[in-house]
Amino acid sequence: MKSGILVIHKPKGMTSREVASQVGKIFHTKKVGHMGTLDPLAEGVLVLGINQGTKVIELLSSSEKEYIAEAVMSINSDTLDITGKLNEFPLEKTYTFEKLKQVLENFHGIYQQEVPLYSAVHVDGKRLYQYARNREEVLLPSKEVEIKEIELMEFLKNPNHPTFRFRVSVSKGTYIRSLIRDIGKQLECPSIMKNLLRTRQGNFVLEEAVPLENVSEETPFIKIEDALYRSGEYDIVVVNQELEFKIQNGAILPRNFSKEYAIMLNEQKELLAIYQKYEKDATLMKPWKVLNTRSMENEKIK
C-alpha cells in the first residue's frame, strides 16, 4: 500500500476533513491526515499524510505559513468572514493605498491575537464554536502570534465597501480572520475576510499542489524522507543490515547524527524509522517512529 505525502490544492466550499476523506477513497485507505486546517471558505495548500505518511505529520507541521487574503471594509460578522451574519456600516472616512499600507505594516512582528469565537479552540472542555452555537457567553482567549511579513497588494475604492488584498507570512496558529478584524480596528472601520488563498505551508508551495479534481490512483506521492529532508531540520543516516534489524525492532543505539532527529534509511535507501536524541543520554538515540518493519506494529515508542 502506497505511503507518502501529497500536497493538494484545496478548493473552496470543502472542509479539510472532507478533502482528506475524498483522497482516502481514491487510494482505498482511511489512514489520511492533514497538516494545518483550512476553513471551507479558504483554498490553497493542504498537506496530506497518507498511510505511514500520517505518522510524520507532527514533524512536518511547520511554524510558518503564507497567504493571500482579501478583506472587505465597513462590514462585520460573527464569524469574522463573509459566511457569517453580516452587519453593514456607513463608510465614515476616506482611505488610501498608503494609509492601508501603513496600518498593515504596524502589524509586522509579534502581537497578542484574540482567538475567533467560531474556532475549534478548547475553553473549559468545550470548543469555542459550541459556545457560539449554543449562544453561551465565553471569555475568548488570546495568544502570541508573529506576523513575519505583510504586504498590501491592492486597494479597490468601492464607495460603500472598499476591499483590499494583501500577502502575509505568519507563525503557526495565526488566524487571518482575526488579523483582518484587528486591522479594521486600527483603521476604525470594521473589516472581514472575503477570500483566502494559502500559498505556502512550511516548504510546501502552491505551485506543487495537485488540484483535488485531478487526483487519481496514479498521482505520485512525495516520499516521506524527501518531505522531511527538504526542511533542513533532519539528518539522513544510511545503515547496514545489522543496524537495520535493530532499528526495525526499536533498539536504542549509539547516536550518529547531530540534529534532534534523523531519517534512518537502509542500504536500498528505503525508509526505516525516525530516530531522535535520547533524553537520558545524549550519546544514544532512540526511535521516534518505526516506519518500515516486519516484526512489530508501527507505533510511536515512548
Image (cartoon, rainbow, N blue to C red):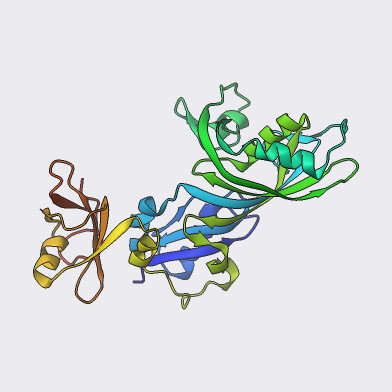
Residue 199 at x, y percent in the picture: 59, 57
Residue 106 at x, y percent in the picture: 65, 35
In the image, residue 290 sits, relative to residue 169, either above or below, namely below
Quadrant for the N terminus in the image: bottom left
Residue drawn where x is 78% and y is 42% of the image: 98
Count of labels in the image: 0
Quadrant for the C terminus in the image: top left
Whether residue 118 is visible here, answered yes or no, is yes
User: Is 3 positioned to the left or the right of 194 in the image?
Assistant: left
Residue drawn where x is 66% and y is 40% of the image: 105
Q: Nearer the viewer, residue 99 or 112?
A: 99
Question: Furthest-right residue in view?
Answer: 159
User: Is 270 positioned to the left or the right of 202 in the image?
Assistant: left
Residue drawn where x is 50% and y is 34% of the image: 121
Q: Nearer the viewer, residue 245 or 136?
A: 245
Residue 70 at x, y percent in the picture: 72, 49
Residue 279 at x, y percent in the picture: 18, 42
User: Is 160 positioned to the left or the right of 102 in the image?
Assistant: right
Whether residue 211 is visible here, answered yes or no, is no
Residue drawn where x is 25% and y is 58% of the image: 262
Question: Furthest-left residue in view?
Answer: 242
Quadrant in which residue 13 is drawn:
bottom right
